[in-house]
Amino acid sequence: MITQKKITCENSRGEKVSFGYFLPLWLKDATGLTSAAYEVSTQRQDGMDGESWQSSCAQKRNIVITAAIKGEYAAQRERLFGFFQPRERGTLTYWEQGGREKIIDYQVESVEFALQGKTRDVSISLICPYPLFRAPERSVVNMAYWEPLVRFPFVYGAPIMTARRIAERIVEVQNDQNVACGLTITFVARGPVKDPSLAELGSGGKLALELEMAEGDTVVVTTGRGQKRTLLNGVSHPEIWPLANDWIQLYPGKNTYQYGAKQGVEHLDVKLEYTLEYWGA
Protein backbone atom coordinates (compact mmCIF):
# COMPACT_ATOMS: atom_id res chain seq x y z
CA MET A 1 0.00 0.00 0.00
CA ILE A 2 1.37 3.39 -1.00
CA THR A 3 1.63 5.95 1.77
CA GLN A 4 0.05 9.15 0.54
CA LYS A 5 2.29 12.22 0.67
CA LYS A 6 1.80 15.83 -0.27
CA ILE A 7 4.13 18.81 -0.46
CA THR A 8 2.68 22.31 -0.76
CA CYS A 9 4.86 25.35 -1.37
CA GLU A 10 3.51 28.85 -0.73
CA ASN A 11 5.50 31.85 -1.95
CA SER A 12 5.66 35.37 -0.58
CA ARG A 13 2.78 36.41 -2.86
CA GLY A 14 0.42 33.87 -1.33
CA GLU A 15 0.43 31.59 -4.38
CA LYS A 16 0.54 27.81 -3.85
CA VAL A 17 1.88 24.82 -5.78
CA SER A 18 1.28 21.23 -4.63
CA PHE A 19 3.14 17.99 -5.42
CA GLY A 20 1.76 14.54 -4.62
CA TYR A 21 0.43 11.34 -6.11
CA PHE A 22 -1.75 13.27 -8.53
CA LEU A 23 -1.41 15.15 -11.81
CA PRO A 24 -0.16 17.42 -13.25
CA LEU A 25 2.78 17.41 -10.76
CA TRP A 26 3.35 13.79 -9.73
CA LEU A 27 5.76 13.57 -6.80
CA LYS A 28 8.58 11.15 -7.66
CA ASP A 29 11.01 11.93 -4.85
CA ALA A 30 11.85 14.46 -2.16
CA THR A 31 15.19 14.43 -0.37
CA GLY A 32 16.26 16.38 2.69
CA LEU A 33 12.97 16.01 4.54
CA THR A 34 13.85 13.22 6.94
CA SER A 35 17.54 13.84 7.53
CA ALA A 36 19.54 16.10 9.80
CA ALA A 37 23.16 17.19 9.30
CA TYR A 38 25.39 18.66 11.99
CA GLU A 39 28.65 20.56 11.83
CA VAL A 40 31.09 19.46 14.52
CA SER A 41 34.09 21.63 15.33
CA THR A 42 37.13 19.96 16.91
CA GLN A 43 40.69 20.99 17.71
CA ARG A 44 43.86 18.96 17.67
CA GLN A 45 46.25 19.33 20.59
CA ASP A 46 49.93 18.41 20.59
CA GLY A 47 50.73 15.18 22.37
CA MET A 48 47.11 14.02 22.57
CA ASP A 49 45.38 11.29 20.61
CA GLY A 50 42.46 12.39 18.51
CA GLU A 51 40.94 15.85 18.87
CA SER A 52 38.98 17.83 21.45
CA TRP A 53 35.37 18.77 20.79
CA GLN A 54 34.75 22.51 20.53
CA SER A 55 31.17 22.98 19.37
CA SER A 56 28.45 21.59 17.13
CA CYS A 57 25.41 23.00 15.36
CA ALA A 58 22.80 21.94 12.84
CA GLN A 59 23.53 22.79 9.21
CA LYS A 60 21.08 24.37 6.81
CA ARG A 61 18.62 21.97 5.19
CA ASN A 62 18.54 21.35 1.42
CA ILE A 63 15.22 19.96 0.17
CA VAL A 64 15.12 18.73 -3.43
CA ILE A 65 11.72 17.96 -4.95
CA THR A 66 11.54 15.82 -8.09
CA ALA A 67 8.21 15.67 -9.89
CA ALA A 68 6.97 14.34 -13.22
CA ILE A 69 4.94 16.63 -15.47
CA LYS A 70 2.43 15.01 -17.81
CA GLY A 71 0.71 17.16 -20.40
CA GLU A 72 0.74 20.92 -20.85
CA TYR A 73 4.49 20.82 -20.32
CA ALA A 74 5.20 24.34 -21.59
CA ALA A 75 2.42 25.85 -19.48
CA GLN A 76 3.58 24.03 -16.33
CA ARG A 77 7.17 25.04 -16.96
CA GLU A 78 6.22 28.71 -17.20
CA ARG A 79 4.03 28.38 -14.13
CA LEU A 80 6.83 26.87 -12.03
CA PHE A 81 9.45 29.33 -13.29
CA GLY A 82 7.09 32.13 -12.33
CA PHE A 83 6.44 30.60 -8.92
CA PHE A 84 9.99 29.63 -7.88
CA GLN A 85 11.80 32.87 -8.69
CA PRO A 86 15.33 33.95 -7.68
CA ARG A 87 15.49 35.46 -4.19
CA GLU A 88 11.99 34.08 -3.58
CA ARG A 89 11.18 33.04 -0.03
CA GLY A 90 8.32 30.82 0.97
CA THR A 91 7.02 28.08 3.24
CA LEU A 92 6.88 24.36 2.54
CA THR A 93 4.19 22.21 4.16
CA TYR A 94 4.76 18.46 4.26
CA TRP A 95 1.96 15.98 4.93
CA GLU A 96 2.22 12.21 5.12
CA GLN A 97 -0.66 9.80 5.62
CA GLY A 98 -0.95 8.89 9.29
CA GLY A 99 1.26 11.80 10.37
CA ARG A 100 0.90 15.47 11.07
CA GLU A 101 1.56 18.50 8.90
CA LYS A 102 4.93 20.18 9.34
CA ILE A 103 6.14 23.51 7.97
CA ILE A 104 9.56 24.94 7.14
CA ASP A 105 10.73 28.22 5.58
CA TYR A 106 12.78 28.06 2.39
CA GLN A 107 14.74 30.11 -0.12
CA VAL A 108 14.71 29.02 -3.78
CA GLU A 109 18.09 27.72 -4.98
CA SER A 110 17.34 26.29 -8.43
CA VAL A 111 14.69 24.93 -10.81
CA GLU A 112 15.68 22.49 -13.57
CA PHE A 113 13.50 20.88 -16.25
CA ALA A 114 14.08 17.85 -18.47
CA LEU A 115 13.77 18.73 -22.16
CA GLN A 116 12.56 15.39 -23.52
CA GLY A 117 10.25 12.53 -22.62
CA LYS A 118 6.60 11.57 -22.56
CA THR A 119 6.57 12.74 -18.98
CA ARG A 120 9.21 15.32 -18.12
CA ASP A 121 10.82 15.75 -14.75
CA VAL A 122 11.32 18.97 -12.86
CA SER A 123 13.84 19.26 -10.03
CA ILE A 124 13.41 22.06 -7.50
CA SER A 125 16.11 22.77 -4.92
CA LEU A 126 15.14 24.71 -1.80
CA ILE A 127 17.51 25.93 0.93
CA CYS A 128 16.19 26.17 4.49
CA PRO A 129 18.63 28.34 6.52
CA TYR A 130 16.86 27.35 9.75
CA PRO A 131 16.69 23.55 9.44
CA LEU A 132 13.90 22.76 11.90
CA PHE A 133 10.30 22.09 10.93
CA ARG A 134 7.46 23.52 13.00
CA ALA A 135 3.83 22.73 13.71
CA PRO A 136 1.31 24.60 11.54
CA GLU A 137 -0.59 25.95 14.53
CA ARG A 138 0.38 27.70 17.73
CA SER A 139 -0.60 26.17 21.07
CA VAL A 140 -2.09 28.44 23.73
CA VAL A 141 -2.05 28.02 27.52
CA ASN A 142 -4.16 30.50 29.49
CA MET A 143 -2.88 30.69 33.05
CA ALA A 144 -5.02 33.59 34.29
CA TYR A 145 -7.98 35.18 32.52
CA TRP A 146 -11.64 36.12 32.74
CA GLU A 147 -14.05 33.56 31.30
CA PRO A 148 -17.30 35.06 29.93
CA LEU A 149 -20.47 33.39 31.18
CA VAL A 150 -23.03 35.28 29.09
CA ARG A 151 -24.03 33.83 25.72
CA PHE A 152 -25.99 35.58 22.99
CA PRO A 153 -28.83 35.96 22.25
CA PHE A 154 -29.26 37.13 25.84
CA VAL A 155 -32.56 37.66 27.68
CA TYR A 156 -32.25 39.92 30.73
CA GLY A 157 -33.80 38.68 33.96
CA ALA A 158 -32.52 38.37 37.50
CA PRO A 159 -28.96 39.62 38.20
CA ILE A 160 -26.40 37.10 37.01
CA MET A 161 -22.63 36.70 36.98
CA THR A 162 -21.33 37.74 33.54
CA ALA A 163 -17.78 36.37 33.94
CA ARG A 164 -15.63 34.40 36.33
CA ARG A 165 -11.96 34.58 37.17
CA ILE A 166 -9.77 31.61 36.21
CA ALA A 167 -6.28 31.70 37.72
CA GLU A 168 -3.79 28.83 37.75
CA ARG A 169 -0.60 30.14 39.29
CA ILE A 170 1.22 26.94 38.33
CA VAL A 171 0.67 24.96 35.12
CA GLU A 172 2.45 22.00 33.55
CA VAL A 173 3.11 21.87 29.80
CA GLN A 174 4.49 18.75 28.12
CA ASN A 175 6.89 18.94 25.17
CA ASP A 176 7.26 15.48 23.65
CA GLN A 177 9.81 16.69 21.08
CA ASN A 178 13.58 16.81 21.64
CA VAL A 179 13.72 20.48 20.67
CA ALA A 180 13.34 23.47 22.99
CA CYS A 181 11.15 26.15 21.44
CA GLY A 182 10.53 29.78 22.26
CA LEU A 183 7.54 31.21 24.10
CA THR A 184 5.32 34.21 23.59
CA ILE A 185 4.33 35.40 27.06
CA THR A 186 1.53 37.96 27.37
CA PHE A 187 0.85 39.89 30.59
CA VAL A 188 -2.33 41.99 30.69
CA ALA A 189 -3.09 44.26 33.66
CA ARG A 190 -6.73 44.39 34.80
CA GLY A 191 -5.65 46.76 37.55
CA PRO A 192 -2.36 48.08 39.01
CA VAL A 193 0.45 45.49 38.73
CA LYS A 194 4.11 45.83 39.69
CA ASP A 195 6.95 43.71 38.27
CA PRO A 196 5.16 40.74 36.63
CA SER A 197 7.22 37.55 36.42
CA LEU A 198 7.29 34.00 35.08
CA ALA A 199 9.44 31.10 36.26
CA GLU A 200 10.09 27.60 34.93
CA LEU A 201 10.48 25.62 38.13
CA GLY A 202 12.20 22.58 36.62
CA SER A 203 15.16 24.47 35.15
CA GLY A 204 15.16 27.29 37.69
CA GLY A 205 14.89 29.88 34.92
CA LYS A 206 13.02 33.10 35.68
CA LEU A 207 12.13 36.39 34.05
CA ALA A 208 10.92 39.35 36.10
CA LEU A 209 10.09 42.65 34.44
CA GLU A 210 10.77 45.98 36.11
CA LEU A 211 7.75 48.20 35.54
CA GLU A 212 4.47 49.34 37.01
CA MET A 213 1.53 48.41 34.81
CA ALA A 214 -1.68 50.42 34.79
CA GLU A 215 -5.07 48.95 33.99
CA GLY A 216 -5.18 48.02 30.31
CA ASP A 217 -1.41 47.77 29.83
CA THR A 218 -0.14 44.77 27.88
CA VAL A 219 3.41 43.39 27.92
CA VAL A 220 4.45 40.76 25.36
CA VAL A 221 7.74 38.88 25.79
CA THR A 222 9.00 36.62 22.99
CA THR A 223 11.88 34.23 23.67
CA GLY A 224 12.28 32.39 20.35
CA ARG A 225 15.33 32.23 18.11
CA GLY A 226 15.91 35.65 16.55
CA GLN A 227 12.77 36.99 18.23
CA LYS A 228 13.91 37.90 21.72
CA ARG A 229 12.14 41.14 22.58
CA THR A 230 9.92 42.88 25.12
CA LEU A 231 6.98 45.03 23.99
CA LEU A 232 4.88 47.32 26.17
CA ASN A 233 1.60 48.21 24.45
CA GLY A 234 3.18 47.27 21.11
CA VAL A 235 6.35 49.36 21.56
CA SER A 236 9.82 47.95 22.31
CA HIS A 237 10.96 48.72 25.86
CA PRO A 238 14.28 46.93 26.54
CA GLU A 239 14.78 48.96 29.73
CA ILE A 240 12.14 46.91 31.57
CA TRP A 241 14.16 43.71 30.97
CA PRO A 242 16.91 43.15 33.60
CA LEU A 243 20.09 41.57 32.24
CA ALA A 244 19.87 38.79 34.83
CA ASN A 245 16.63 37.50 33.30
CA ASP A 246 16.42 34.15 31.52
CA TRP A 247 14.84 33.79 28.08
CA ILE A 248 12.63 30.94 29.25
CA GLN A 249 11.84 28.23 26.68
CA LEU A 250 9.50 25.29 26.35
CA TYR A 251 12.08 22.61 27.11
CA PRO A 252 11.85 18.92 26.11
CA GLY A 253 9.81 16.97 28.63
CA LYS A 254 7.67 18.39 31.41
CA ASN A 255 7.71 22.15 31.99
CA THR A 256 6.28 23.70 35.14
CA TYR A 257 5.53 27.42 34.87
CA GLN A 258 4.58 29.78 37.69
CA TYR A 259 3.61 33.42 37.25
CA GLY A 260 3.74 36.15 39.86
CA ALA A 261 4.17 39.85 40.60
CA LYS A 262 5.52 41.97 43.44
CA GLN A 263 2.14 43.66 43.72
CA GLY A 264 -1.27 43.19 42.13
CA VAL A 265 -0.92 39.59 41.00
CA GLU A 266 -4.70 39.24 41.36
CA HIS A 267 -5.08 41.81 38.55
CA LEU A 268 -2.79 39.96 36.13
CA ASP A 269 -3.90 37.96 33.09
CA VAL A 270 -1.19 35.60 31.77
CA LYS A 271 -1.08 33.66 28.50
CA LEU A 272 1.64 31.40 27.05
CA GLU A 273 1.90 30.58 23.34
CA TYR A 274 4.36 28.30 21.55
CA THR A 275 4.92 26.42 18.30
CA LEU A 276 6.42 22.94 18.49
CA GLU A 277 9.52 22.27 16.38
CA TYR A 278 10.88 19.06 14.84
CA TRP A 279 14.28 17.91 13.59
CA GLY A 280 12.73 16.32 10.52
CA ALA A 281 9.50 15.82 8.64
Image (spheres, rainbow, N blue to C red):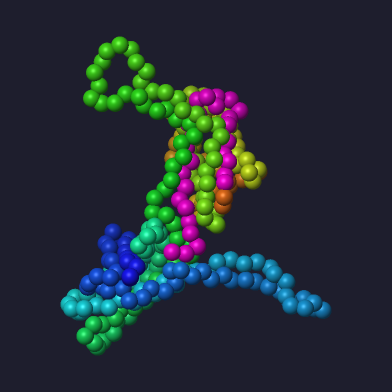
Residue at horizontal 27 percent and vertical 63 percent from the top: 16
Q: Farthest residue toward the front?
A: 1
x and y percent of residue 227 in the render? 50, 51
Q: Is residue 28 visible?
A: yes
Quadrant for the N terminus, please: bottom left
x and y percent of residue 252 in the render? 56, 52
x and y percent of residue 223 in the render? 53, 48
> Which residue occupies the foreground of this view, 228 or 146?
146
Q: Quadrant of residue 265?
A: top right
The answer to whether 115 is drawn above or below residue 110 in the figure is: below
Quadrant for the C terminus, please: bottom left
The answer to whether 184 is drawn above or below residue 281 in the figure is: above
Q: Quadrant of residue 118?
A: bottom left
x and y percent of residue 248 in the render? 58, 46
All told, the count of numbered labels is 0
Q: Farthest residue toward the right?
A: 47
Q: Farthest residue toward the left?
A: 72
Q: Assess whether residue 262 is covered by the magenta stretch.
A: yes
Q: Is residue 80 visible?
A: no
Left or right, 278 with respect to 22, comes to right
The answer to whether 190 is drawn above or below residue 233 in the figure is: above
From the image, give the main secondary structure of the stretch colored magenta. Answer: strand
Left or right, 234 with respect to 55, comes to left
Residue at horizontal 19 percent and vertical 75 percent from the top: 75
Q: Provide the residue span drawn in magenta.
A: 254-281
Left or right, 241 with respect to 162, comes to right
The answer to whether 149 is drawn above or below residue 108 in the figure is: above
Q: Assess whether residue 83 is covered by the magenta stretch.
A: no
